[in-house]
Image (tube, rainbow, N blue to C red):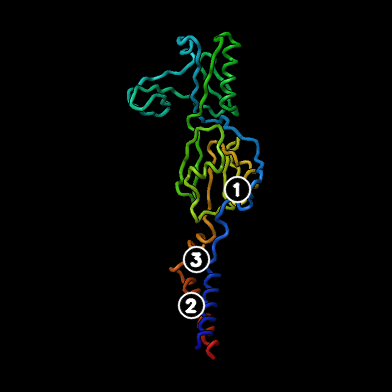
Amino acid sequence: MNLKNIFTATSCSLLLLATSCSTPKNITYFQDATAGETVNALTPLEVRVKPEDKLSIMVNTPDPTLSSLFNLLQIQNRISATTAGTRSTGASGAGTSQTSLYTVNPEGDINFPVLGKLHIASMTRFEVGEYIEQELVSQNLVKDPIVTVEFANTGITVLGEVKSPGRLEFNKDHLLFTDAIAMAGDLTTNGKREDILVLREQPDGSQKAYRVNLLDIDALAATPVYYLQQNDVIYVEPNNKVKRQTTPTGDTPFTPTFWMSVGSFGLTIATLIISLTN
């Protein structure tokens, strides 16, 4: 075989190999984004109160004695730790103030000192604070109250092909889908970026499914789950390559299909070389 034939055979071999090992196209996020493009997202969706949420609610007035009537018991503790049902507000190493939390019942209510049962389901934390302030003033209990409300157990769950799966807590009034992915350590290279499942709990207890495409920035910004809510579940499916590898006939070194592919490739090269030498 002369050098020309060898070069031709080698080139064909490399071409076939390159074709079989092409670079995946579905790895890069936001492939449709261009410089200077304006992306229109939905109106920010703030976290709203749901049954089983735990809230820290503090009433402040000029009179500390009066304020104490509307606040749950605070436990002074020298140990810097938070126990179940309490929220630590002190500095590390110093005495801590642990405030008992309000748990929203299945009907969306809490039992508030003096005021009694309050229905706060579907309110933001700011709306809850304003509601309690209005009730205190309208009932001539406090003249100028300041009510501070915080969520104590706000979190989402991220599963599947991410680097750090699990439940992620956050203390923001709204959380972006991309924030959650970053908190989970980003997707692995095996994650299916164009079809991510998000489950969201509905008022009747059912789960509604949404699909998110990280390759399309406009589609991402337009999805109802661009702003996440507490208890949302994100599941990143494995891509098709991984799915094939987990089946009995997957294309891996441990399956007959793999060796059949290798044999077929070798036979093709051998046939090509023989034809060039004749």
The kind of secondary structure element at disc 1 is: strand
What residue sits right under mark 2 in the picture?
263
- Report x, y in % for residue 204: 60, 35
15, above or below 155, in the image: below
Q: Residues within 10 Å of mark 1 (few under 14, many from 20)?
A: many
Q: Residues within 10 Å of mark 3 (few under 14, many from 20)?
A: some
**Separation of disc 3 and disc 2 at Cα?**
16 Å
Quadrant that contains the C terminus: bottom right
Q: State how far apart marks 3 and 1 are (Cα).
A: 27 Å
Task: Give the residue drawn at x 53%, y 84%.
Answer: 4
Which amino acid type corresponds to the residue marked 2 in the rendered image? Gly
Nearest to the eye among marks 3 and 2: give it. Answer: 2
Where residue 199 is drawn, which disc sits there? none
Which amino acid does the dot numbered 3 rest on?
Gly
Above or below for 207 versus 27? above
Q: Nearer the viewer, residue 209 or 5?
A: 5
Residue 250, labelled with which disc? 3
* Residue at image location 46% in from the left, 11% down from the top: 64
Q: Image quarter for residue 198?
A: top right
Mark 1 — residue? Answer: 212
Q: Residue drawn at (57%, 57%), measured in percent from left and top?
A: 26
Residue 241 image offset from top left, x and y in percent: 52, 61
- The residue type indicated by label 1 comes to Val
- Asked which secondary structure carries label 2, the reply is helix
